[in-house]
Amino acid sequence: MIGKYPAKLDDKNRLFVPAKLREELGNVFYVTYGFNGSHKCLTAYTEADWNVLTENFNKLSIAQRSGATSLIFINAAECSPDKQFRFGLTQNLLNYAGIEREVLIVGRAGQAEIWDAAEYEAFENENLSPEKLLASLEAIGL
């Protein structure tokens, strides 16, 4: 998944799935807490990726399944877009990410992230330097 797509949260806490992400996300996907650096956002996982996360979680010891690790699952929402390709988000998820109205949905390799637009702008400005971009390219082998 790639690209960034502006969106607006409607009065029923729904977002429109961008056309370019519809096929990749599928008919059912999962949204939960996410972060990028020190910035909070939401992360959307395909059903297949969510199943892998669930399997990995279930393999953890009881001690490892407590705390923050369990919060990813406890606060997750199963999303099935309607005929207009809208999906709902819980108030808890919106509060966590500070999302009020203006949103950016961004593709990040195998997941999509859902950001409050102002928070994403701060994240991008913080990371859009030649030094940080070069370090990122080197980290992924370019």
Image (cartoon, rainbow, N blue to C red):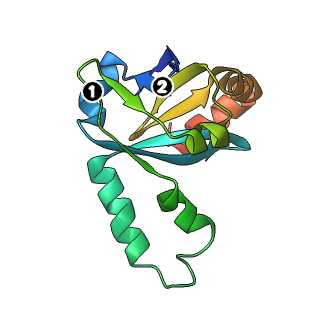
| Residue depicted at x 28% and y 48% | 47
Badge 2 or badge 1: first in the primary sequence: 2
Query: Of the residues tagged 2 and 1, which is closer to the observer?
Result: 2
| Side of 71 relative to 110 (left or right) | right
Total numbered circles = 2
Residue 136 falls in which quadrant of the image? top right
Q: Position of residue 74 (x, y in %)?
A: 50, 60
Task: Give the residue number, with chain letter if any, for mark 2.
Answer: 12
Q: Amino acid at mark 1?
A: Asp
Q: Which residue is mark 1?
A: 82
What is the secondary structure assignment of the residue under circle 2? loop
The answer for how far apart the CA atoms under marks 2 and 1 are is 13 Å
Q: Quadrant of the N terminus?
A: top left
Q: Residue at x 50, y 35 (%)?
A: 113
Q: Quadrant of residue 98?
A: top right
Q: Residue 82 placed where, x, y %?
A: 27, 26
**Residue at 65%, 30% in the rendered image:** 133
